Image (tube, grey):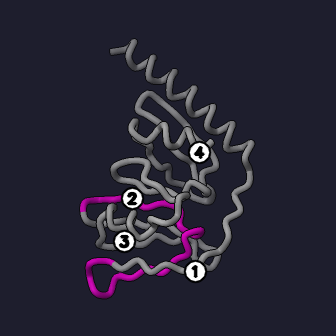
Amino acid sequence: VSLSYIRHLKRNLKAAGEISENLNGNSENNINQEEAILIEGNNKNEKISISPSAFYFAKSDGNYLQVYYEQNGEQRQDMIRLTLSNLISVFDKYDFIMQCHRAYVVNTKKIKGVDGNAQGLRLKLENVNSEVLVSRNYVSKIRDLA
């Protein structure tokens, strides 16, 4: 168990270092402001109108999503009754918004760094204190960004 832990730790630290180095080298995070997109929840009164460039990430908890975004220069987070797959379909035409875990969708233009440990990779985003998890299935997609 200890050898497996060390092997995973080394592999993920190496991957995190490579991705972070490439992200820092490609500092062109300029996103054109797009029209606001309306995200409608399953309940009638649940609506969030945001620009895709203002979206940070969303975390799924069953049929609910915690959506983190920027509005009028300040961070906001709203809970909405919507599945992750429905949110992905809303942002389908924006290739910089992608799923990185079974419970997370992230705006890849907001990634400022990547950290790794034996459990996997964690994304650090601009102006957000939370970390976004990356599952093993999505590590190669995150690596391709760099």
Does label 3 or label 2 sit earlier along the sequence?
2
Q: Position of residue 99 (x, y in %)?
A: 42, 53
Q: Position of residue 144 (x, y in %)?
A: 56, 41
Seen in the image, is 121 located left or right of residue 54?
A: left
Residue at (43, 41) in percent of width and height: 138
Mark 4–mark 1 Cα distance, whole angstroms, equals: 24 Å
Does label 4 or label 3 sit earlier along the sequence?
3
Q: Position of residue 93 (x, y in %)?
A: 49, 66
Name the secondary structure under disc 3. strand
- What amino acid does circle 1 point to? Glu
Seen in the image, is 96 located left or right of residue 138?
A: right
- Circle on res. 59: 2
Does label 4 or label 1 sit earlier along the sequence?
1
Q: Is residue 51 magenta?
A: yes
Magenta stretch in the rendered image: 41-62
Q: Mark 1 — residue?
A: 35
Name the secondary structure under disc 1. loop
